Amino acid sequence: MKRKLMALGAVAALSLSLAACSGGGVGGGEEGKVADRFEQFFDGLIAGDGTAACDVMLVDAETPMKDDSATYELCTTTYDGMGDLFKDAMEEAGVEKIEVTKVEIKGDSAKVTAKGAGALGGEESLTMTKVDGEWYLGQDSFEG
């Protein structure tokens, strides 16, 4: 449980530099599906919608957070209502939106690169994993 709390804290810290997403640089197909799920996560954070954000996260390498009730409840409770905090932090960093610029898929792993996602609005790459046909952000994406 301590690892899960630490990972959620890392997500919160990283998320303070994020804004609403736009998949402008990514086409359709499987890359578009990855970009859409990435956007769902960050749009949920910005809206203060813990359910939307946590529905796109993994607890471990293969378990969607929504399938682990204790962790899911902790996650949704943590992010519900935090939208204004994220919006204020993004405004201070001068970030207006995140633009997914590239998606690289290798099997069940995808590297998503987004402009505006890094600290102070820089570029950041996060890893997503495909589980049962859906793409999720793994907690290792946020662990440095």
Image: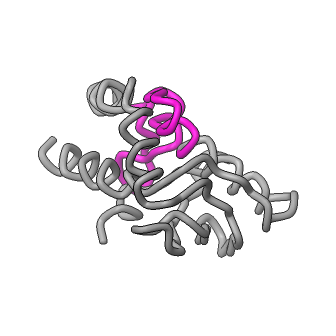
Residue at the far left in the pictured view:
2
Q: How many marks?
A: 0
Where the C terminus falls, by quadrant? bottom left
Q: Is residue 15 above or below residue 94?
A: above
* Residue drawn at the location 43% of the way across and 44% of the way down: 63
Q: Is residue 70 above or below residue 32?
A: above
Q: Colour scheme used in the picture?
A: one colour
Question: In the figure, residue 98 lies in which quadrant?
Answer: bottom right
Which segment did they paint magenta? 42-67
* Residue drawn at the location 27% of the way across and 29% of the way down: 74
Residue at the far right in the pictured view:
28
x and y, in percent, of residue 67 in the image: 42, 31
x and y, in percent, of residue 119 in the image: 40, 68
* Residue drawn at the location 39% of the way across and 25% of the way down: 80
Question: In the figure, residue 101 lies in which quadrant?
Answer: bottom right
Q: Is 89 in front, or is 104?
A: 89
x and y, in percent, of residue 108 in the image: 61, 64
* Residue drawn at the location 54% of the way across and 74% of the way down: 123
Q: Is residue 49 above or below residue 31?
A: above
Left or right, 90 with respect to 32, comes to left
Left or right, 133 with respect to 141, comes to right
x and y, in percent, of residue 62 in the image: 45, 51
Check if residue 44 falls in the magenta segment. Answer: yes
Check if residue 87 falls in the magenta segment. Answer: no
Q: Is 89 in front, or is 57?
A: 89
Where the N terminus falls, by quadrant? top left
Left or right, 59 with respect to 109, comes to left
